[in-house]
Structures are given as structure tokens and as C-alpha cells.
Amino acid sequence: MSSGEDSGERNPFAPPPPGAPDQPWRPRVPQPPTDGPDGERPEGERTPWGRPQPEQPAGPKLDPSDPLHRTARNALLCGFASLLAVLATFPWIGFPLGLLAVWYAVTVLRTPAEPVADPFAPRPVRPQVPAALSALITGGLALVMSLSVFALQFAYHDYLDCVAGSLTKEGAQSCAVDERAPAWLVTMTEGADQ
């Protein structure tokens, strides 16, 4: 197998020529295809890159030193933590975390954007707005779910205490008759026990 010296190409897997100095290791980066002298590729040459793409401007990134970005990040973390806590049947933890997420998200969304020179130009989306909106949705959902659990426990406190204190399945079923619990709640508590 040839090392590519006779064809003018260099084989990257071929050993270095004898007497060549040692070079430090560096990662191989694919070279972009070269265009011909008139800007066109030679005929028959195929490259995996396809047509050259124009460089896109990099979008705005989160800056940890900016207090607004930190607030948006904290809102997002609190929102997801509150939703996970409520789904893991810890509504007393999910409720304050949901409140905190909604508070942080509203704080970020109420902060005015920086003024621009051209009032008719489209304003770029601030990078903290999507995080704040996600936190508002997850925190609000966690608040609704935890409040519904609290309302259910408050409204049917006697029935839930009777079921928790019953030692047999028949005793739990008699609680539904004694406390006049709705059928959907009886079905839900029986499904949770199984």
C-alpha cells in the first residue's frame, strides 16, 4: 500500500518519513474543500460538506454574572423541582418551590428590555425569556396540582382519616358509606392501596 507520496496526497495513517522530527499530538480537523481558481470545484470531486453554508451569527448566551440570567436559571430550576416534588407525592415541598418559580419568572418577564436605536427593527428574543416562560408553566402547574391535593385533603379529611385508620378492606369500604364519599374518590383511594 502506498503512503501517497507518489500521487501528491499525504496519507494521514502512513508513518512519517525517516529522519522527520517528532511533532506534538494535535487532533485532526477535517479541512474544508478547496475551490478551483474560478470559484468552482473540479468536476467529479465530491465532498461530504456539500455547498458552503454562510456563517450564522451566534445567538445570545446565558451570562452567569448577570443577575437577570441567574434569576431566570433559578426560576427554571425551581419550576422543575416543584413539578417533580408534586408528582412524587410531596405537595408540601412542591407548593413553596412552585411559588418561588412563579415569583422569579414574573420578575424576569417584567424587567424591561434594553432600548434599541431603531424602534421599527424586530427585537431579538432575550435569552432569559424562554427559561422564565418554562418556569412559569412548570411552577404554575405544580401550584395547581398541589393546591388541588390540599383542597381534596381539606374537603374529605374525615373520609381519608377513616380509610387510613381502617385495618381491613371491609372497614375501608364502610368508611365510604359512613362519610358519604364520592365514587371517584373511593375508586382513587382503592387504586392507591393496591
Image (cartoon, rainbow, N blue to C red):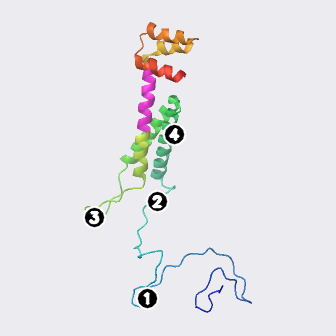
Up the image or down, 64 lies above or below 173; here it is: below
Name the residue located 58 percent from the left edge and 87 percent from the top edge: 9
Inter-mark Cα distance, 3 to 2: 23 Å
Dot 1 or dot 4, earlier in sequence = 1
Inter-mark Cα distance, 1 to 2: 38 Å
Name the residue located 47 percent from the left edge and 41 percent from the top edge: 79
- Residue placed under numbered mark 4 in the picture: 81
Q: Is residue 68 magenta?
A: no
Could you say which disc has been placed on residue 36 in the image? 1
Up the image or down, 185 lies above or below 32; here it is: above
Inter-mark Cα distance, 3 to 1: 42 Å
Kind of element beneath mark 1: loop
- Residue placed under numbered mark 2 in the picture: 61
Kind of element beneath mark 4: helix
Q: Over which residues does the magenta segment extend?
A: 139-153
- Residue placed under numbered mark 3 in the picture: 118
| Placement of the N terminus among the 4 image quadrants | bottom right
Where residue 122 appears, as percent x and y from the top left, is 29, 61
Where residue 41 appears, as percent x and y from the top left, is 42, 85
Where residue 84 appears, as percent x and y from the top left, is 51, 37
Callout 2 touching callout 4 (CB < 8 Å): no
Q: Is residue 152 magenta?
A: yes
